[in-house]
Image (cartoon, rainbow, N blue to C red):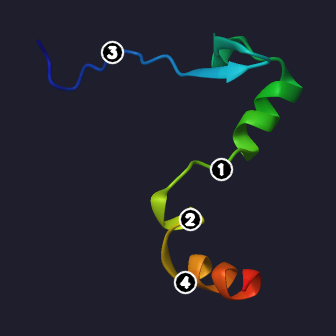
Amino acid sequence: MNPQTRTPCETFSRSMGYIRPVKNFNIGKYAEFCERKTFTESNSLTAGARHKELLKMAA
């Protein structure tokens, strides 16, 4: 097998309560999908300076 050959990978996302392939989204749903932000622990409320800032505001 040629190492340059790649197998196509299909991306799925939950939309309107169903898990569907992104390639089947209409233009509007695809645009909304592209605007989504991926969760990372460093951006979560329980990590880093943002968490400390929120705790101060809550006190």
Q: Residue at x 88, y 28 (%)?
A: 28
Q: In the image as oriented, which residue stretches furthest toward the right?
A: 28
Disc 3 is placed on an element classified as loop
Q: What amino acid is at disc 2? A: Asn
Query: What label sits on residue 3 in the rendered view?
Result: none
User: Residue beneath label 3, please?
Assistant: 7
- Whether tag 1 and tag 2 are in contact, CB under 8 A, the answer is yes
Disc 4 is placed on an element classified as helix
| 3D distance between C-alphas at marks 1 and 4 | 20 Å
User: Residue beneath label 2, please?
Assistant: 43
Q: What amino acid is at disc 3? A: Thr
Q: Earlier in the sequence, mark 2 or mark 4?
A: 2
| 3D distance between C-alphas at marks 1 and 3 | 26 Å
Q: Earlier in the sequence, mark 1 or mark 2?
A: 1
Residue closer to the observer: 20 or 2? 20
User: Of tags 3 and 4, which is closer to the observer?
Assistant: 4
Disc 2 is placed on an element classified as helix
Query: What label sits on residue 37 in the rendered view?
Result: 1
User: Residue beneath label 4, please?
Assistant: 49
Query: Badge 4 local density, few (<14 within 10 Å), some, or many (20+)?
Result: few
| Quadrant where the C terminus is found in the figure | bottom right
User: Of tags 1 and 2, which is closer to the observer?
Assistant: 2
- Whether tag 3 and tag 2 are in contact, CB under 8 A, the answer is no
| Quadrant where the N terminus is found in the figure | top left
User: Of tags 2 and 4, which is closer to the observer?
Assistant: 4
Q: What amino acid is at disc 1? A: Lys
| 3D distance between C-alphas at marks 2 and 4 | 10 Å
